[in-house]
Amino acid sequence: MLDGRPSLLDIISAKRRIDPYITRTPLHHYLSLDNLLDAEIYVKHENHLRLGAFKMRGGINLIAQLTKEEKKRGVISASTGNHGQSIAYAATLFGVKSIIGVPENANPYKVESIRNLGGKVIFHGRDFDEARQHVELLSREEGYRYIHSANEPMLLAGVATATLEIFEDLPDLDIIIVPVGGGSSASASAIVAHNLKPDVKIIGVQAEQAKGAYLSWKSGSISESTMNTKAEGLATRVGFELTMNIMRDLLYDFVLVSEKEIEEAIVMSLEKTHNLTEHAGAASLAAAIKLKDVIKNKKVVLMNSGGNITATQLNSVLTGNTGSL
């Protein structure tokens, strides 16, 4: 690993390591999206993984490589839901105690899933970053092995296996659009593309209402933002060092989308791909619509990072977008 960044060999090793525990996700081509966007559009359906989100890959790869001493201590992490599910699931696979800190307003379905997967849930703070700061303190006080949701090379190597699959299925692609919260998926995709086909453009997308990672990428230093988005997977208040460094070096572009654009993309995903998509997962489609002139006549992959949307959230989106149905 160079400066903490996983190498292509690390990613290939991760794929071999996690393959027994995951199902390869499909890369589907949608003619209806082609017609809408004047491009050749594919969707990488990470929402089809058992836990409904891409994070599962990183959790398994990391927990599988912990030392005996770390496994004995147990692990602790913070999450808005999907990362927490991945850590709880992987910890249970390998007989490790896991504690997941979540914000007080965390998605109840994701919280229930974390518990069902064997994780102990603790609630703290108004948002992800307050929960993160709390579990970092607990890890120092209690001796747990702290797992950051982004600054973990083994997490990135596992997450990157999704992009490795994309290149296996579609080696002549031009662009991949990836949602960004902590940046693990976008930075992982950029590493794979840089090694396999450097002219492939990786474009990140974050919510206008939670743009800490975007501001960090633009400014060249870790920046903080207010956070008012409904997109849990994009809801990080600050950029993180490892993923920001990778994205600054390798990301082609980074765009912001509004809450309205995200919700319209959830409805469009349901209409055009027949998939339930959470807010973060729909951000890649929202960005593609915004970048229609940039992607025209290109072969484009949209990363559907997750499908863990609640019935209440879906109902709110659908009633607010009835004109699109």
Image (tube, helix red, strand yellow):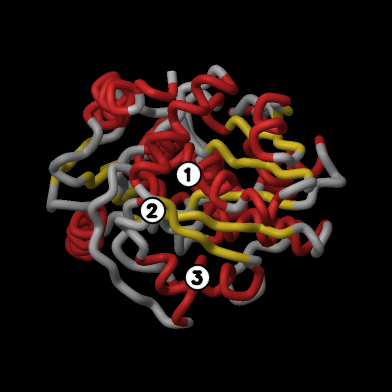
Answer whether residue 116 is visible to the viewer in this image: no
Q: CA distance from mark 2 to mark 3?
A: 16 Å
Q: Residue at x 36, y 62 (%)?
A: 211
* Sooner in the amino-acid sequence: mark 2 or mark 3: 2
Q: Quadrant of the N terminus?
A: bottom right
Classed neighbour count for the residue bearing mark 1: other residues with Cα under 10 Å, few (<14), some (14–19), many (≥20)? many
Q: Quadrant of residue 272?
A: top right
Q: Amino acid at mark 2?
A: Ala
Q: Amino acid at mark 1?
A: Ala
Q: Residue at x 34, y 45 (%)?
A: 259
Q: Residue furthest right?
A: 172
State the SS at label 2: strand
Position above or below: 279 against 157: above
Position above or below: 269 against 138: above
Q: CA distance from mark 2 to mark 1?
A: 8 Å
Q: How many marks?
A: 3
State the SS at label 1: helix
Is the residue under label 1 in contact with that under label 2 (CB below 8 Å)? yes
Report the side of 297 relative to 287 (left or right).
right
Name the mark nearer the viewer: 2 or 3.
Answer: 2
Classed neighbour count for the residue bearing mark 2: other residues with Cα under 10 Å, few (<14), some (14–19), many (≥20)? many
Classed neighbour count for the residue bearing mark 3: other residues with Cα under 10 Å, few (<14), some (14–19), many (≥20)? many
Answer whether residue 263 is visible to the viewer in this image: yes
Report the side of 54 relative to 24 (left or right).
left
**Observer-nearest of 94 and 6:** 6
Is the residue under label 3 in contact with that under label 2 (CB below 8 Å)? no
Q: Amino acid at mark 3?
A: Met
State the SS at label 3: helix
User: Which residue is the site of mark 2?
Assistant: 207
User: Which residue is the site of mark 3?
Assistant: 244
User: Which residue is the site of mark 1?
Assistant: 283
